[in-house]
Image (spheres, rainbow, N blue to C red):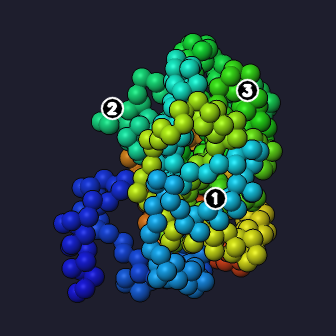
């Protein structure tokens, strides 16, 4: 009864993010109620293994009382302090310091946002400001990857290259461009080296097409996330960074998903010793216990902006909740759990185990490709392995599989193009990885029992 009225009220009043409104009205909301470790319970009393950490964010897992305690204590002591007008709070300063100490290269300056989209959007604004104030105002164009995701803010969504985020929203703007994403499973190149060289060439060609002196920056996720969990070949990021330096454009990594142990190390930049000019994070920063994101800026850019801006003139970028003390206190405790609590180390161990289990999925008639880095994985379903045929979009395969998965007690994410993704909490044990994979394999078998799917294979 209660559940029914909740679902009715949801239908009537809540506009859900990234949903087909009519489809949502038809199927109704799946209402989650509580969580512990890697498990969630919904309002019907079903227990689910959360193979997607909420929205790839609850990296420490659910139910950490120590996080609740620091948030409660901070709310009691000082629920809010602005960062405007030279004010600040202890947790925000302490968090900025700890993050800067751990960030790659000379990313020593942190601006706090509310999440990933406004971290990216803040980078876009500050890059423009940087080139204007340092008297190179022609450098305005930005390049990102096809299939990339960089949020849904009004300008930043133009860097995203997922069709539903563009259609009808008047983005990309004329100054936003995209080059092909390196996609090892679907490439004609024979080797990783050739694929990397082709990517570098795409960037160079795009810069030449726009005009070498007009391009400001190249943005990339270290692993393309929402575009289908596509892991680039090792060395790709290093080659793109080198090309950016050669082309005199900023190299910007978006670690909103990959940050905070998702791919193994604290930041994915560590796999290749990258030194980006800007980096964005969110999600794992607070593990979803409170909203917060951040951008990191290099010393060079910080100093250039500070020097060129007339003394006393405020740099007009900020939000009421930038550096929110409760979120910052949560971020500090989450960081402690990652490090002293051993959650990053556990994620690395379980990530290695997960990779071996994923490889076993390739025996399944529906699985064309598996790819992963740490506890971030994509599984690509095909109806013909030899030709790598994508399932007909009308069959709605990923969404159907996710629904079957839910009925089998497992949450994972459905993307387009026959792809599903995993990003379980980093506290997952190897036994829980086994359970996750058993439930997934059972769901694949159940999907194959559906006549339309069997007929298509
Ligand atoms: N960048 C990347 C790489 C993301 O995956 C996301 C969110 N999935 C964003 C930016 C936007 O973050 P948010 O949803 O917190 O605004």
Q: Is residue 305 visible?
A: yes
* Rendered position, 28 above or below 418: below
Q: Is residue 184 visible?
A: no
Q: Residue at x 69, y 75 (%)?
A: 337
Left or right, 424 with reference to 147: right
Q: Nearer the viewer, mark 3 or mark 1?
A: 1
**Residue to which mark 1 is pinned:** 96
**Residue to which mark 2 is pinned:** 170
**Residue to which mark 3 is pinned:** 245
Confirm or reject: label 3 Cβ below 8 Å from ligand 1: no
Distance, label 2 to label 1, CA atoms, is 35 Å
Q: Secondary structure at mark 3?
A: helix
Distance, label 2 to label 3, CA atoms, is 31 Å
| Precedes in sequence: disc 2 or disc 1 | 1
Q: Residue at x 57, y 19 (%)?
A: 136
Q: Quadrant of residue 279?
A: top right
| Precedes in sequence: disc 2 or disc 3 | 2
Tag 3: Cα neighbours inside 10 Å, few (<14), some, or many (≥20)? few
Tag 1: Cα neighbours inside 10 Å, few (<14), some, or many (≥20)? many
| Precedes in sequence: disc 3 or disc 1 | 1
């Amino acid at each position: 009864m209660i559940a029914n009225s909740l679902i009715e009220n949801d239908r009537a009043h809540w506009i859900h993010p990234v949903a087909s409104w009519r489809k949502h009205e038809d199927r109704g909301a799946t209402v989650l109620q509580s969580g512990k470790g890697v498990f969630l319970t919904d309002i019907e009393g079903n227990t689910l293994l959360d193979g997607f950490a909420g929205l790839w964010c609850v990296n420490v897992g659910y139910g950490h009382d120590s996080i609740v305690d620091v948030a409660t204590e901070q709310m009691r002591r000082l629920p809010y302090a602005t960062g405007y007008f030279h004010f600040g709070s202890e947790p925000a300063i302490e968090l900025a310091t700890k993050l800067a100490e751990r960030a790659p290269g000379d990313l020593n300056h942190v601006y706090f946002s509310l999440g990933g989209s406004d971290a990216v959007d803040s980078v876009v604004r500050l890059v423009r400001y940087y080139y204007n104030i340092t008297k190179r105002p022609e450098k305005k164009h930005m390049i990102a990857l096809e299939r990339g995701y960089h949020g849904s803010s009004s300008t930043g969504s133009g860097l995203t290259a997922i069709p539903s985020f563009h259609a009808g929203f008047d983005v990309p703007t004329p100054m936003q461009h995209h080059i092909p994403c390196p996609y090892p499973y679907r490439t004609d190149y024979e080797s990783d080296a050739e694929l990397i060289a082709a990517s570098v060439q795409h960037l160079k060609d795009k810069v030449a097409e726009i005009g070498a002196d007009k391009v400001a920056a190249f943005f990339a996720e270290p692993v393309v996330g929402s575009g289908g969990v596509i892991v680039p070949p090792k060395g790709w990021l290093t080659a793109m960074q080198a090309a950016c330096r050669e082309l005199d454009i900023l190299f910007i990594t978006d670690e909103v998903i990959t940050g905070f142990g998702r791919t193994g190390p604290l930041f994915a930049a560590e796999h290749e010793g990258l030194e980006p000019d800007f980096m964005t994070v969110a999600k794992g920063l607070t593990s979803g216990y409170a909203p917060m994101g951040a951008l990191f800026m290099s010393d060079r850019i910080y100093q250039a902006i500070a020097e060129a801006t007339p003394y006393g003139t405020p740099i007009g970028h900020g939000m009421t909740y930038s550096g929110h003390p409760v979120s910052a206190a949560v971020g500090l405790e989450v960081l402690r759990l990652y490090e002293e609590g051993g959650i990053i180390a556990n994620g690395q161990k379980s990530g290695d185990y997960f990779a071996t289990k994923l490889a076993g999925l390739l025996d399944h008639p529906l699985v064309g490709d598996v790819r992963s880095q740490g506890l971030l994985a994509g599984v690509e379903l095909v109806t013909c392995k030899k030709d790598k045929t994508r399932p007909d979009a009308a069959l709605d395969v990923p969404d159907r599989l996710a629904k079957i998965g839910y009925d089998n007690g497992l949450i994972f994410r459905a993307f387009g193009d026959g792809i599903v993704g995993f990003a379980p909490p980093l506290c997952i044990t190897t036994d829980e990885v086994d359970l996750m994979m058993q439930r997934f394999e059972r769901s694949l078998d159940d999907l194959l029992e559906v006549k339309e799917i069997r007929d298509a294979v």
